[in-house]
Image: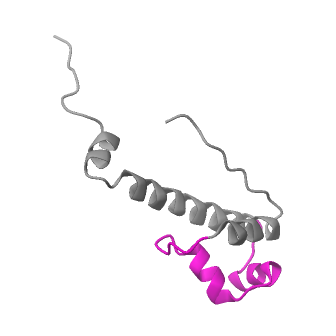
Amino acid sequence: MSKKNIGSNFDDFLNEEATLDGATAVALRRVIAWQIGEEMKTQQLTKTELAKRMHTSRAALNRLLDESDPSLTLTTLASAAAALGKTVNIQFAPA
């Protein structure tokens, strides 16, 4: 007897609860903050140094690294990427 999944997947559940878009945004935000933090470690950059490179305050950088802060803008993301010697690549993928 083969086992079959019972019910829907988690994305279907979130969609039914009308929270899929919010959950996806939170997940993306966490990944972005994590990637910036990891690149800072790789380059041995302090928050102060990265903030200087971005021409912003350390408080603004703290908001960028705060995975629960929803105020991330593409401008801020692009500035952080440039300060880290990176580029941002955003694309739409099939659902």
Horizontally, residue 11 falls left or right of residue 43, namely left
Up-down relation of residue 91 to residue 23 (above or below): above
Residue extending furthest left? Answer: 1
The x, y position of residue 18, in whole percent, is: 30, 53
Q: Which residues are magenta?
A: 43-72
Q: Residue at x 63, y 68 (%)?
A: 37
Q: Residue at x 26, y 46 (%)?
A: 16
Res. 58 image quadrant:
bottom right
Horizontally, residue 3 falls left or right of residue 30, namely left
Up-down relation of residue 4 to residue 81 (above or below): above
Along the line of sight, the residue nearer the viewer: 94 or 57:
94
Residue 28 in magenta stretch: no
The x, y position of residue 68, in whole percent, is: 46, 72
Res. 59 image quadrant:
bottom right
Horizontally, residue 8 falls left or right of residue 71, namely left
The x, y position of residue 72, in whole percent, is: 59, 71
The x, y position of residue 34, in whole percent, is: 58, 63
Q: Residue at x 79, y 67 (%)?
A: 84
Horizontally, residue 39 falls left or right of residue 69, namely right
Looking at the picture, the colour scheme in use is one colour
Quadrant of the snapshot with the N terminus: top left
